[in-house]
Image (spheres, rainbow, N blue to C red):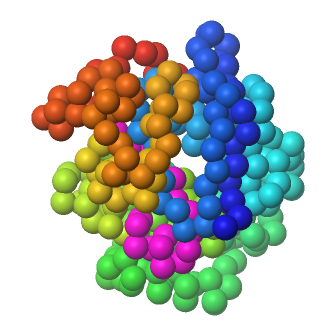
Amino acid sequence: MEAILKFDQVSKDYPNGVHALKKVSFEVSEGEFVSVIGPSGSGKSTLLRAINRLIPVSSGTVWLDGQAVSAQKGKKLREQRCKVGMIFQNYNLVYSLSVLQNVLHGRLGYMSGLKGVFGLYSEQDKQEALDLLEELGLEQFCYNRASDLSGGQKQRVGIARAIMQKPKLLLCDEPIASLDPSSAKTIMDLLRDMSQKRKIACIVNLHQLDVAVKYSTRIIGLSKGEIVFDGTPEELDDRTIEKIYGTSRENLMMGGTADDKADTVDCA
């Protein structure tokens, strides 16, 4: 299966001297559900943000759908970014607008400037947004302000907005970090099921090792900017976990988080 995403010897160095990524290479194909794990400062957020060039890489090449993202500018870069839906830890919603309007924002990248400014969405877009909200169990909140929702509901709106882009790749940066366990399970179930249903590749940054093992078809483990593991959850043994986190699986599962064990600088 052809790769939708390819990292080829990608490095990222920050001005403060931190080497966030060091010659990272991997590929992701259509329909894969990939969790990226590692302690704070391991490069997880940097890796995610390099994919659609929210940050520039220092060397190497990021390929998205056969195009070198690092070489794109202006309109070409905007077109590439339309292929990538992003889901954020802090939701990134416009809280003064309705739930439906927030979901429709997923179509802005495909609209001309004036139509986007005035929110002149097509009837087809509006119906698709309503259908998505129904699929996510939010149909009764369509016209509520986004600020009125719970954390889990806000994240569902974020998922709907990302899906409205009709992306080829979903990027999820700590999507359950702010949620209670029940809401976190709902969000992970939705991410897995909706991406599989639509054959969208999905990359999720996670601190929760048990969640990564449960939901992923593949796990990438980062340590100090380098890939130290790339395989299935079944292949992630105790020795490798200790290599990634610097502590045992038992410590991580007993309430300690990757952040608690990290002694590196969180650079992104």
Is residue 73 found left or right of 171 in the rendered image? right
Is residue 128 found left or right of 72 in the rendered image? left
State the residue at coordinates (67%, 28%): 23
Count up the numbered dots.
0
Residue 14: x and y, percent?
A: 65, 18
Viewer-closest of 247 and 77 = 247
Viewer-closest of 98 and 216 = 216
Residue 142: x and y, percent?
A: 40, 78
State the residue at coordinates (77%, 28%): 59
Is residue 87 found left or right of 14 in the rendered image? left
User: Does the magenta segment cover residue 99?
Assistant: no
What is the magenta range?
191-207
- Is residue 242 visible from the viewing direction of this image? yes
The residue lying furthest to the left in this view is 254
User: Does the magenta segment cover residue 203?
Assistant: yes
The residue lying furthest to the top in this view is 17
Q: Determine which quarter of the picture holds residue 255.
A: top left
Viewer-closest of 96 and 146 = 146
Q: Determine which quarter of the picture holds residue 19.
A: top right
Looking at the image, residue 194 lies above or below residue 34 = below
- Is residue 178 visible from the viewing direction of this image? no
Q: In which quarter of the image is the N terminus?
A: bottom right
Residue 85: x and y, percent?
A: 59, 60
Residue 148: x and y, percent?
A: 31, 62
State the residue at coordinates (75%, 60%): 65
